[in-house]
Structure formats: C-alpha cells, structure tokens
Image: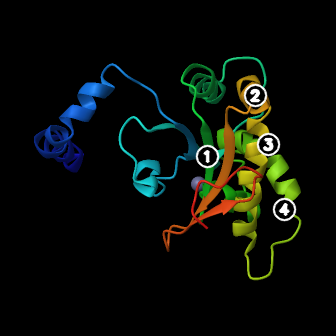
Amino acid sequence: MRHLSEGVDRFQREVFPAKSGLFAHLAATHRPGTLFIGCSDARVVPELITQTEPGELFVVRTAGNLVPAYAPGADAVAAGIEYAVAVLGVRDIVVCGHSGCGAMTALAEGHDLSGAPAIADWLRHADASRARTTAPAAGEDAVAALVRQNVAAQLANLATHPSVARALADGDVRLHGWVFDISTGAVDELDTGARPLLAA
Ligand SMILES: [Zn+2]
C-alpha cells in the first residue's frame, strides 16, 4: 500500500499543480466525449492507452468488458451507460477487449468455474460471443478469436440499451470496437460500419 500513498503524495505535489487550470474547469464541468467500456484487467488502462486527460473519458470497466444486454432492473453497467449517453451526451462509445484476457481465456479453454459461481454467472453474458466464434482465423489462437468476437457481441448488447438505441437512431452516437495488445501496445479497430476513430 505504501506506493499508493506515495503516489497520492506525488500527485498532489507535482501533477495536480501542473494541471490546476484543468481541474478548476472540471470542478464544475463534466462533458466527456467518449464512453469507454473496457476490461477490469489491471494492465488495460484506458487513459494511458488513449493518452487522454481527466474529463475526457467516461469509463465503465467490467470483467471481460462484458455489457449485459438490456433488462429492466438494478444494474450498475446499464446505469453507467444510460448516464453517459442520455445525460452526458457522449458522441462515441468504445468497447475495448484485450490480449490475454482472463475471462476470455477461461471460456476459450473451458476452465472449471464451479468454485467461482459469481464469475461463472457473469461470463454467461459472453454466451453470444462464444456462439459467434466458430473457428479462429489463420494464425489466430482460440483466445484471440474469442476476444475479437466478444467485442463485436458486446457492441450488439450495447445497442439493446434504450438510451443507446435512441442515440443510434438519431445519429448522435457511434460505436467502436477495439482490441488492445498488451505485448505490443497495438490497438486494432474492428469494422463496425462507423467511421473509424483510429488512423488506419
Ligand atoms: Zn480482460
């Protein structure tokens, strides 16, 4: 824990003063342009990958970057999406998968999850991802294939949320699917039909 408190110390001493104007502005303004839905994986840091400043990304992170399809009821993921889209008015939504994802590895390799019932339940939200992954492309392993298909499946789930469906119908939001490679830093953009965010 000590390096955390030292980090806070350094933030207050060096980083915050250098960005004091930005934080003064942000104290009264919250207008992120992008909803970024990524995996909870500690190695996939949205602001680092995209080199964005505080205030730019509204971030929802879940195990396996899964977005449950819309269903009425209490759901933190649905509430986060609705807030970002309907209240904050984000213009872009990125669902970002990544190499070496523990959730996708467990599914692709058929790990025994009987001792982890909450994880097993949660990963059911990737059922469509598994169904879409018929065979890996040449040179691609089973985990990588599932990671890609999972991003596509979660984008489809995202569109079942009423706030997203409305914004899509009105042309107010664009959906993007990314895959981040931890070993190379590469970010691959899936073809979603929307104008790509990344330079080709
Ligand atoms: Zn992951």
Q: CA distance from mark 4 to mark 2?
A: 31 Å
Q: Which quadrant of the figure shows ligand 1? A: bottom right
Q: Secondary structure at mark 2?
A: loop
Between marks 2 and 1, how big is the CA–CA gap?
18 Å
Q: Which residue was labeled with disc 1?
A: 94
Q: CA distance from mark 3 to mark 2?
A: 17 Å
Residue topped by disc 2: 170
Quick check: 108 left or right of 85?
Answer: right
Residue 15 is left or right of residue 93, and the answer is: left
Residue position marked by numbered label 3 in the rendering: 156
Residue 78 pos. (x, y %)? 66, 26
Quick one: label 1, few (<14), some, or many (20+) residues within 10 Å? many
Q: Tell me where residue 69 appears, x and y as whole percent.
A: 78, 33
Helix, strand or loop under label 1? strand
Q: Secondary structure at mark 3?
A: helix
Q: In this view of the protein, which residue sits in the foreground, 32 or 79? A: 32
Q: Nearer the viewer, residue 188 or 3?
A: 188
Quadrant that contains the N terminus? top left
Q: Estimate the spatial distance between the alpha carbons at disc 1 and disc 3, rounded to whole Å.
A: 12 Å
Which residue is labeled 4 in the image? 133
Residue 116 visible in the shown view:
no
State which tag comes first along the sequence, 4 or 3: 4
N-term mark: 1 or 3:
1
Query: Tag on residue 126?
Result: none
